[in-house]
Amino acid sequence: MLGKTAGGLYWMFRYLERAENIARLVEAGFRIALTRSSNRDSEWESVLSTSGVLMAFNKKYDACTARDAIDFMLRDPSNLSSVLTIVKNARDNARLVRTALTTEVWEAVNDNWMTLCQLLARPVREAELPEVLGTIRQHSALVRGALHGTMLRNDIYYFSRLGTFMERADNTARILDVKYYTLLPHSSFVGSSLDNMQWETILRSVSAHRSFRWLGEDDTTASAIARYLILDRRLPRSLCFCAEQTVKNLDLMAEEYGAHRPCYDLAMRQRARLRNRDIESIFDEGLHEFLSTFIVDNNALGAQIETDYRFNG
């Protein structure tokens, strides 16, 4: 496969996953703000920081309010990481690789773009936000369903899945980091009912609340929930699950092309670091420090994948 086509597939699915996860990050900020009785707008600065757009936001706005932060993250054309901009990028990449996609996948991507253009044609009111965010997640799921149900399991599929799991790992780490940055007004609240409620909000924002309960988990503490979202290999959005799937798809790529590339070694090391950890050692290191290192390493892995498969070649 041409590197340009491989890159188009990889980034198409990274963008689709990113749009969904920005919606999840907005939802996390929205739910967390609801747990505060005062100064709810201050939470959004932390959400913007975690999503990497705070500097761009501050260039446009003098103060951070919930309304402006939500608008900036969902639909502002000046924000290159807004949901609407990212979904357009996904559609542009889908057009680039149109001949590599089934009709069902292309139509799902195109319908996603047209639906969000209508949905985000005007600023989203706070009362409408949960429904809007649900629609963004739903249309992302429809694209994934079309991919799973209609595509051959070959290098086209592997690059698509690789993009999904690389992006998902990054965003799960960032959503967890929101908790570090925002939530508690003072360290004395650690372990309190407020602390536990906010951790439960993080679970809900990554659609993991019900599965957490299915496993018989009644311990909604920071340690139990962080362990689930970081280390549980059964949860599709955990860091460990994403690392496993990244290795798996790179391994399948090696079978397809007859050799492992340097990115495979990086992915193996990242998986090993997660496999050989327990949540106590992560908290001893510092949750923020652990997540920051993970994000940096994940970015380095992504850059190596692009180099190894000549996305720009």
Image (cartoon, helix red, strand yellow):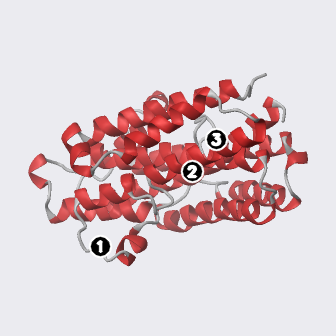
Q: Quadrant of the C terminus?
A: top right
Q: Position of residue 4 (x, y in %)?
A: 80, 31
Q: What kind of residue is marked 2?
A: Gln
**Residue at the (52%, 31%) spot, across then down:** 266
**Residue at the (39%, 58%) spot, across then down:** 232
Could you say whether the residue bearing mark 3 is in a helix, strand or loop?
helix
Pick out the residue farthest to the left: 188
Q: Which residue is mark 1?
A: 217
Viewer-proximal residue, 298 or 72? Answer: 298
Q: Position of residue 197 (x, y in %)?
A: 25, 65
Asked whether the viewer can see residue 84, the reply is no
Q: What kind of residue is marked 1?
A: Glu
Classify 10 Å Cα crowding around label 2: few (below 14), some (14-19), many (20 and above): many
Q: Is residue 119 left or right of residue 245?
A: right
Counting residues from the start of the chain, the first of labels 1 and 3 encountered is 1
Q: Which residue is mark 3?
A: 250
Viewer-proximal residue, 227 or 89? Answer: 227
- Mark number for residue 115? none
Using the numbered discs, state the Cα–Cα distance from disc 1 to disc 2 in whole angstroms: 25 Å
Image quarter of residue 260: top right
Counting residues from the start of the chain, the first of labels 3 and 2 encountered is 2
Camera-nearest label, 1 or 3: 3
Q: Is residue 134 above or below residue 77?
A: below
Q: Which residue is mark 2?
A: 245
Classify 10 Å Cα crowding around label 1: few (below 14), some (14-19), many (20 and above): some
Q: Position of residue 221 (x, y in %)?
A: 22, 62
Image quarter of residue 210: bottom left
Counting residues from the start of the chain, the first of labels 1 and 2 encountered is 1
**Residue at the (42%, 41%) spot, across then down:** 272
Q: Is residue 7 above or below residue 225?
A: above
Could you say whether the residue bearing mark 2 is in a helix, strand or loop?
helix
